[in-house]
Image (cartoon, rainbow, N blue to C red):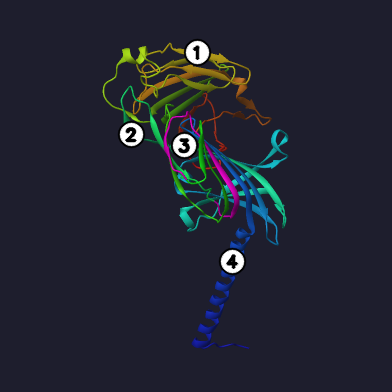
Amino acid sequence: MEVFLTRSRLTLILSLIVFLSLCFLSSSALSSSSSTTDLKILTAERRIDLSSHIIRVVLTLKVQNDGASTASNVLLAFPPAQAKHLALIHAAEVAGKKRKKTLHPLDVMTSNNADLPNGAKLYSVALRNPLSAGGSVTIEVSYVLTQSLEPFPVEISQSEPQLVLYRDSALILSPYEIKQQTTVIRTPSTKVESFTRVEPSTQTRTELKYGPYEDQPSFSHTPIVVHFENNNPFAVVEELVREIEISHWGNLQVTEHYTLVHNGARHKGGFSRVEYQSRPTYSGVASFKHLLVKLPPRVHSVYYRDNIGNISTSHLRTGYSKSELEIEPRYPLLGGWKATFVIGYGLPLQDVLFESNDGKRYLNFSFGCPIAETLVVLPEGSKNPSAVASRMLLAPSNHT
């Protein structure tokens, strides 16, 4: 039996299909939205460490499920400026209290970043076990922000301290309602020029405390600015090229080429070496005094040089688990100044090169940060090389 459809009847059927599809999508969206609002944060504590040029934050959340169904994920929200400079993020479920607490690592991944209030960017934390209706769980989130401090003023003389601005929100940005929250900001010293007051807020020596704040709705945001003294050198590696050469004679040679810049307040005026050396506590306080390079254990034949030649102001400490090379630049690095140098070292080949039963050899070596360009030189006669890279960071970053 053949069935013939008129154009009007076909149009009606298509309209019904579209309508039902839209109803289904709307129902899914409502279901997703309701699942988000089913979670509530009972307590939130955020501790922000501004003691260096890299910002470290620990966020502790006690999450409760007020819905009728289980929840398997908890969403985290970041302002767009912080999401851009998010270098590292870890999450863990907390079991026990205080000194007896145990942290169980959780997976963190980017979430759907549709149009959200205050331009928020979402990350999703996968719980170890689904959170049942009426249940609660405590999560500890640690994350790192780079290049998030603004020098102000942007230029300073050799005798001036370095002042910076930190921008954030007194209220924790979250897709959930927060019943009670506090934020504690730690500065390098008591020298705080100014900070935005959002009552209740207090200053006690090197700590600024915002809160406690009660019953804040989702995506609440109250901008704050902290202006304080931070004389840490803002070390940023602009370029890093690492050469790894595998020798037939039982040695692995590593050569690293660095371009380093002081990304803090730019130096203005002339530079006096006499003043720099005679008044170290006042002159060039934000300059580079030394750098610490962490190397693998059992390193040998270590050298440190630049375009002029070998630099002797270095100290090497070796151990069973790691080696540390303390170096001093040939000249002090003030704000905006750059330095290029090379660090080289050797390693016993048996520490990093392994042989499988099928006769293939595997080089297991850390290639370092994602900004590095890595060159591997294989011995003569090597065939069919392949590479497998594992990424340790959970979020994109601008590394320093």
Q: Are marks 4 and 1 in contact (CB under 8 Å)?
A: no
Q: Is residue 106 above or below residue 302?
A: below
Q: Is residue 164 above or below residue 39?
A: above
Element type at marker 4?
A: helix
Q: Which residue is mark 2?
A: 154
Q: Is residue 361 magenta?
A: no
**Amino acid type for the residue under numbered disc 4:** Leu
Q: Is residue 113 above or below residue 193?
A: below
Please report whichever mark, 1 or 3, sits nearer to the chain's N-terminal start: 3
Badge nearest the viewer, 3 or 2? 2
Q: Which residue is mark 4?
A: 30
Q: Which residues are magenta?
A: 174-197
Spatial separation of the CA atoms under disc 2 and disc 4: 48 Å
**Amino acid type for the residue under numbered disc 1:** His
Q: Which residue is mark 3?
A: 146
Task: Estimate the x, y position of residue 370 in percent, counting from the top left.
Answer: 49, 36
Give whichever of 366, 201 is nearer the camera: 201
**What number is the disc on residue 315?**
1
Please report whichever mark, 1 or 2, sits nearer to the chain's N-terminal start: 2
Spatial separation of the CA atoms under disc 3 and disc 2: 18 Å
Position of 151 compared to 128: left or right? left
Spatial separation of the CA atoms under disc 1 and disc 3: 28 Å
Number of numbered discs present? 4
